[in-house]
Every structure is written in C-alpha cells, then in structure tokens.
Amino acid sequence: MHTDTHVKSAGISRKWLRPVVAIVGYAVIAYLAFRAMDRTRMAEGFALLRPQHLVLLLGIALLHIAGRAFRYHRLLLRARPHATYRWADGFLIFLIGLSTSAVTPARVGDLVKAKLVRPFGIGTSSGVGLVMIERVLDLLVMCLTIVGMGMVLSDRPASGAWSRTAALLLVVLILGPVAIGHHPIRGWGIRVAARALRAVRPSLASKVETTSGELFGVWDTVFASPATFAVYVASSCAVWALDFCKLWLVVRMLGGQASLAVCFFIYPVSLLAGVLTLLPFSEGVVGVTGVALLSSIGQVDSSTAILAVAFDRSVSSIPPLVLAGAFALASRRRAQHGSLRE
C-alpha cells in the first residue's frame, strides 16, 4: 500500500513538474528580453506596425498551419481511418498536437496525436508512424533550407557551425527513409534491436517486433512510390517557405534590413534548436536562438531582433490555440446535434 501511494505521488509530482518548469522558463526568457530591450526603440517599432501588417502576417500564419494540417489529413486518409472520420477531426488532432508540442521537450507533445487517432480505427503504433513521417518531412525541409542558405551566407562565420550540423542531420534524414523503405535492411534492423532487448527484457523484445511492423507499415502505405515521397517533400517545402518569409516581413516592417536569405537561414535554425532541446519551453529556445542569430548574422540591433522574434512567435503560436478551441467547440456541437437527432 505504501509503495503504491509513493508511486502515485511521484507520478503526480512529475505531471506538474513539466508545466511549472515551462512557465518558469518562459518567464525568465521574457524578463531577460524585457531587460535587454531599448524602451524607446520598442515604442518606435510598434509605431511602425499597421493593422494591415497584422492581417498579412496572420494570413500567412494561417495558410502555413492550414497547409500542414491538410498534409496531416492526407496522411491520415492513407492510413485508412473509419468512415466516421472527417477532415475537421484531422485538423483538430493536428492543432492539439501543435499546441502541446510547445511545452514539451524536443516537441514530443506531437505524440499525443497517436492517441487521438485511435477512435477512428488507427492504432497507436500507426499514429506514431504518422507523427514520425511528419517529423521527417519537416526536418528534411529545415535541413535542406539551412544547407542551401548556408552556402549563400558562407562569408558569415556564424553560419558555418549550423550549416555543418544541418548537413550531417540531412545525411541521416536521407539515409533513414532509404533504409526504412528497403524491407531487408529494415527487417535486419528490427531483428537486431529485438535480439539485443531479448537478452534484457524478453517481453519487451516481442512487443518491439510487433510495434515496429505496424509503425513502419504506415510508411509503406503512405509512400507507395518515390514519386509520392517527392510530392510530399515538395509540398512541405512550399508550406514552410511561407512561414520562413514571415520573419523577413516582420523585420522589414520594424525597419530592419536583414535579407531574405538571412531570414531563411535563421528561421529553420531556430526551429531546429527548439526540436533538439530537452527543455519543456521549446518556443522560448526558438525565440532566444532567433534573436541571437538575427543580431549576429543579420546584423539587426538587439531591440529590433527581440521585438521581431517575439511578434513572429506570437503570430505563429496563438492561432493554433484559438483554432484548436474553435474546432473542439464545433465538434462538440456537432456531436450534441447528432445525439439530439437520434
């Protein structure tokens, strides 16, 4: 009894620890940013913004979110959900995962989508496989952009380390899908992992073999041919290009002079830093990285950089929360309407 109580209390403490650390982390970052800003420059920057600027930036953010949500919807359809599934369900699941990932280390909050798809006949392992596909596509776009823009900005020393890191990750991201798509290599990898686990935990080894079959089975279903994979990569590039442009527009609206190439390098680098971090305030890590790189590579003054990144991240982060609430409310009303008709 005492052991059960202790385990339960430990679970409760861990449950609350992550949100508390996230809140503290965001608060510290906000305080340091406020201390570093020139109040006069901040007021001048806000004075330059117009309502039409906000409408334009929100429109770009919504197009980006809608594009990624539609991609997830198409991926779900390829996993063959039940007939009860509707596109609004896929959009809501995507938005919940997007919002949750902001307060989880390495943005693993996306994995909540693997549980939310179960009512539509898609198993948890298959749901994880869909999240894996999304993550691979997004990382491919980021690394391709960083490597490409790094070549353009090769004369700026600060870009070198990130370009080399992205190039290394890009090689892994290219070889990974090739290995996954090649059944003999994939099967060999699963058998090696299961054999290693069998020596330690036999029950887990058999579970890994079963789960891996379902997880990678989704990959085979979605990417039935290299051409399909290429289409998904190309469409992902187009969707992310919209988001990368947004930071450049904000900087220009605030009077900064950073080039489009600089912003196309800085934005994916900051997102990559947020993905790789183990801290539960990944959006804060994205912001800090963006400010540091705008100041060093983009040669934008620190006050303008802080204001531009804060404005950009707000435009990117708030709409998913609002849309998730709207979709959830609409789904609830639809369910209530259906029950009343019955």
Image (cartoon, grey):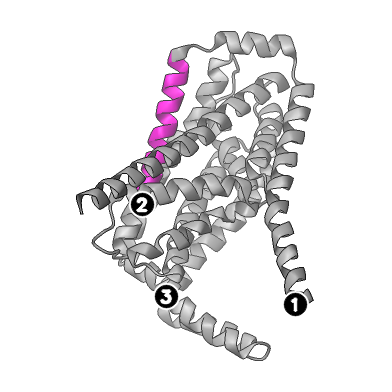
State the extent of the magenta-drawn residues as a range. 52-70
The amino acid marked with disc number 1 is Met
Quick one: label 1 or label 3, which is nearer the N terminus? 1
The amino acid marked with disc number 2 is Gly
Label 3's element?
helix
- Please name the residue shown 52% across and 83% down the image: 207
In the image, residue 290 lies at what x, y percent? 65, 34
Secondary structure that dominates the magenta span = helix
Dot label at residue 90:
2
Disc 2 from disc 3: Cα separation: 20 Å
Nearer to us: label 2 or label 1: 1
Location of residue 285 with respect to 140 vertically, above or below = above
Between 122 and 148, the one lying in front of the other is 122
Q: Are marks 2 and 1 in contact (CB under 8 Å)?
A: no
Q: Position of 109 compared to 77: left or right?
A: right
Label 1's element?
loop
The amino acid marked with disc number 3 is Glu
Dot label at residue 1:
1
Disc 1 from disc 3: Cα separation: 38 Å
Label 2's element?
helix
In the image, residue 67 lies at what x, y percent? 37, 42
Quick one: label 2 or label 1, which is nearer the N terminus? 1
- Please name the residue shown 66% across and 19% down the image: 304
- Please name the residue shown 43% across and 14% down the image: 52
| Quarter in which the C terminus is drawn | bottom left
